[in-house]
Amino acid sequence: GENVEQHPSTLSVQEGDSAVIKCTYSDSASNYFPWYKQELGKGPQLIIDIRSNVGEKKDQRIAVTLNKTAKHFSLHITETQPEDSAVYFCAASTGTASKLTFGTGTRLQVTL
Amino acid sequence: NAGVTQTPKFRVLKTGQSMTLLCAQDMNHEYMYWYRQDPGMGLRLIHYSVGEGTTAKGEVPDGYNVSRLKKQNFLLGLESAAPSQTSVYFCASSKGGTDQPQHFGDGTRLSIL
């Protein structure tokens, strides 16, 4: 089955700096890669996603890149703000039921 | 719209007891999923459903059963709870298809003593 690895497990940046989280996946058939943000006591919230026919996607301060050949994808957050502090999860989707395999999460802390 | 609603939010059980977690979605989504989240392990798929009356096993199905009698509801049952099932349980739903986003509820925190 699919295996998704996520790094780093923790990341601390100063407000205004950029943050990058990287994930690799194992199944070349995976075709959909969402990123979720999870705040304490809440469920994961979709922040951006990318499909396998696209190399890059941007939404304001958030961008995701996908390298299908290398089987890795990354989340980029620019101009970080304290409200960006949360746990971020990457995931990969395979098959007709869109089952997601999640990475183990990155705890991002944005300090003032 | 409420989106995905999970009940209860918290529950404490004793080993051997049974219970049912309820997930309801108001987005007319075809697919529904149950995950568990444990520290350091991300979310793992327990069971899922691609339509009313259908269910299938995910990555960690042992000890759980599910039912999808109505399109908007997906129930997760624990017949004989074990301490290893202490976790946070999340339900999600999606429109269906191979690349549609999943929308999550806020979870049920379950402790089994």
Image: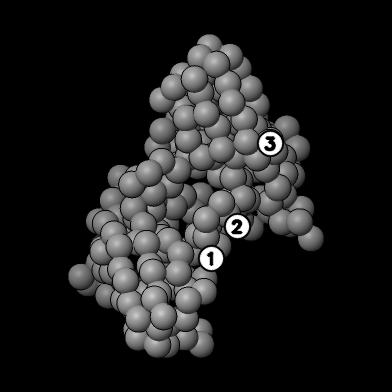
Q: Nearer the viewer, residue A11 or B3?
A: A11
**Outermost residue toward the top?**
B16
Residue B20 to residue B99: above or below: above
Q: Which residue is mark 1?
A: A46
Q: Answer with the quarter of the image where residue A62 lies.
A: bottom left
| Label 1 in the same subunit as label 3 | no
Q: Are marks 2 and 3 in contact (CB under 8 Å)?
A: no
Q: Which residue is mark 3?
A: B8
- Under tag 2, what secondary structure? strand
Q: Quadrant of the N terminus of chain A?
A: top left
Give the amino acid at mark 3.
Pro
Q: Which mark is residue B24?
A: none
Q: Residues within 10 Å of mark 3 (few under 14, many from 20)?
A: some
| Label 2 in the same subunit as label 3 | yes
Q: Residues within 10 Å of mark 1 (few under 14, many from 20)?
A: some
Give the amino acid at mark 1.
Leu
Q: Can you see residue B73? A: yes
Q: Which residue is mark 2?
A: B103
**Outermost residue toward the right?**
B1
- Residue at 49% x, 54% y: name it: A98
Q: Which comes sooner in the sequence, label 2 or label 3?
A: 3
Q: Position of residue A43 (x, y in %)?
A: 56, 54
Q: Position of residue A54 (x, y in %)?
A: 40, 79
Q: How is the image coloured?
A: one colour
Give the amino acid at mark 2.
His
Q: Position of residue B61 (x, y in %)?
A: 45, 29
Residue B3 to residue B91: above or below: below
- Residue at 46% x, 50% y: name it: A99
Q: Residues within 10 Å of mark 2 (few under 14, many from 20)?
A: many
Mark 1, mark 3: which one is toward the viewer?
3
